[in-house]
Amino acid sequence: MMGARNVELITAAVVMLLIPLALAIGLFPKLLHGLDGGHEKVKLAKLAKGYSPSTSNLTITDARVDTTSALSLTTVSKRNGIETGRTTKFYIPLVAKGADDDEPIRVIIETSKLTASEMSELEESSSIKGIARDVMWEGLASSQREWFTTKAHRKLAKDVLLFEYKAEPGSDLVLFLVAVGVTTAIMGIIGVIVVVKQRKG
């Protein structure tokens, strides 16, 4: 009996350690962005020539958004068949001023903050600030890449950059710490409960 209980405790402990660890690994790019204290202002034409900034926090200048080829994706959340909410993300090509339509797109902006006033601001701005999502497995999804090439008939650069508009490294760090911290705390509480029940049994 004691051996069986020990095995159960060990199994529970491993599971409760693996869940926060898996979450931490999944959110690891957020941690790296959160710890990135740099910032660089760079022209889009320079990025198009293959320049690699030393930081993911960028202000891209001399550029304009091309809303004629924008992609919007809406995700609907449901519980028991009932809609509980929906979120929409927009993916908009960023092109150099004066660029020809047949030039490969080097940067795709990602944003979920796109009210009418924000769209106007984005269209009028020649400097776009945000975070380049280029760490580890981050980047434009294959389905999104396919949409731009087959539906919008746009040519994408092989190393097309996904750029989150107005993203802040501090928000990434908070998300990582809160998500991993809360999950670890919950697993710890469950662990204590399991141990207490095992001892009582």
Image (cartoon, rainbow, N blue to C red):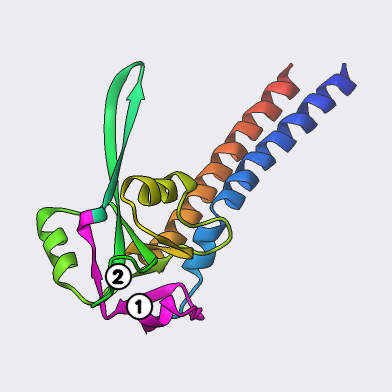
Residue depicted at x 43% and y 51%: 145
Residue depicted at x 18% and y 73%: 125
Dot label at residue 95: 2
The mark nearer the N terminus, 2 or 1, is: 1
Residue depicted at x 35% and y 78%: 44
Check disc 1 and give the amino acid type.
Leu
Position of 71 with respect to 24 (left or right) is left
The kind of secondary structure element at disc 2 is strand
Position of 116 with respect to 60 (left or right) is left
Residue in front for this viewpoint, 132 or 157: 157
Residue depicted at x 41% and y 47%: 144
Magenta span has 57?
Answer: yes
Residue in front for this viewpoint, 40 or 95: 95
Q: Quadrant of the N terminus?
A: top right
Residue in front for this viewpoint, 155 or 176: 155
The kind of secondary structure element at disc 1 is helix
Picture quarter containing residue 143? top left
Position of 117 with respect to 11 (left or right) is left
**Structural distance between the alpha carbons of marks 2 and 1:** 7 Å
Picture quarter containing residue 136? bottom right
Rendering coords of residue 39 (x, y %): 41, 80
- Alpha-carbon neighbours of circle 2 within 10 Å: few (<14), some, or many (≥20)? many
Asked if residue 130 is positioned above or below residue 92 in the image, the reply reads: below
Dot label at residue 44: 1
Position of 125 with respect to 142 (left or right) is left
Check if mark 2's residue and mark 1's residue have beta carbons within 8 Å. yes
Rendering coords of residue 30 (x, y %): 49, 59
Q: Quadrant of the C terminus?
A: top right
Q: Give the range drawn in magenta.
A: 40-68
Asked if residue 191 is positioned above or below residue 119 in the image, the reply reads: above
- Alpha-carbon neighbours of circle 1 within 10 Å: few (<14), some, or many (≥20)? many
